[in-house]
Amino acid sequence: MKITSTILAVLIGSCAFAQLKFPAVSSHSEIEQKVGLTEFEVEYNRPNVSERKVFGKLVPYGEVWRTGANENTVIKFNQPIKVNGKDLAAGEYALYSIPNKDEWDVIFYKDTKNWGNPKEWKESNVALKVKAVATKSMNNKVETFEIRFTNVTQQKADLVLAWDNVNVVLNIETNTVSSVLKMIGEQLNENSSARDFYNSANFYYSNKLDRNQALKWVNIALEKDAKAPDYYKELKEKLEKEKY
């Protein structure tokens, strides 16, 4: 009986000290996007406007902002890219920014383990800093801070930072074409399947590369597969008719 009472007291004590769980003020979000062969991941926290004046007050002009809430906003990608025309190595970066009225500095920072801004800002950790235009819209207010990819193609996409009535767009370019050309050069051979020859020809056609080479490959695909789908023949017709 005494042992039972002791166990009960321990359980009651544990419940008394159990940590209460409350919803986060700024919601957590993770997004993934594939651009060509490059895989992107963004992890961040999303503050709300909540009837506050955001840029110029809550987020002061001319000062480093964590580009979100709470811990670092982190962006990862597995292949080198260009951001607004500038090279950036594959890896994992904290995404900081310095908002101003008409233009932002956006910073890819190597140390991703901070809560908010680093206690000591190190220029040696700045992998890349680019400028981007801040576009304002009075008719399209974004209550909850958002990071999204738009205008996604095989080679590029726009990375958009949107909050309140401000949009900032970063132009992202991948190395898709050079990667695929290298793969074709190393792997396409006489033993490759009809599908591989068709896909190689279609990639050349889609990216306006060597038309004669693409035509050779689609002809090989048709020779290899007597029951090839109609779109093989349609690609051949396009290559024969179109001049680019």
Image (tube, rainbow, N blue to C red):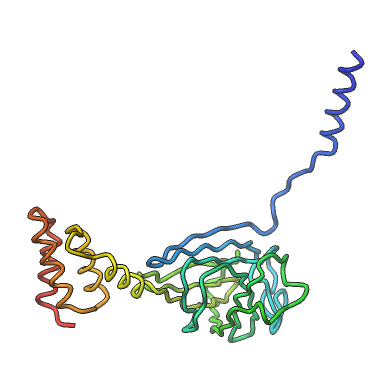
Position in image of residue 51 (x %, y %): 68, 67
- Residue located 89% across and 17% down the image: 3
Query: Looking at the figure, which quarter contains the N terminus?
Result: top right
Position in image of residue 58 (x %, y %): 72, 74
Please identify the residue farthest to the top as the structure is shown. Answer: 1
Position in image of residue 96 (x %, y %): 64, 74
Relative height, residue 132 to residue 162 (above, below) = below
Q: Nearer the viewer, residue 214 or 23?
A: 214
Position in image of residue 18 (x %, y %): 80, 39
- Residue located 54% across and 77% down the image: 168
Please identify the residue farthest to the right as the structure is shown. Answer: 2
Count of numbered circles in the view: 0
Image quadrant where residue 121 sits:
bottom right
Q: Is residue 139 left or right of residue 235?
A: right
Query: Looking at the figure, which quarter contains the C terminus?
Result: bottom left
Q: Is residue 202 left or right of residue 27?
A: left
Q: Nearer the viewer, residue 226 or 118?
A: 226
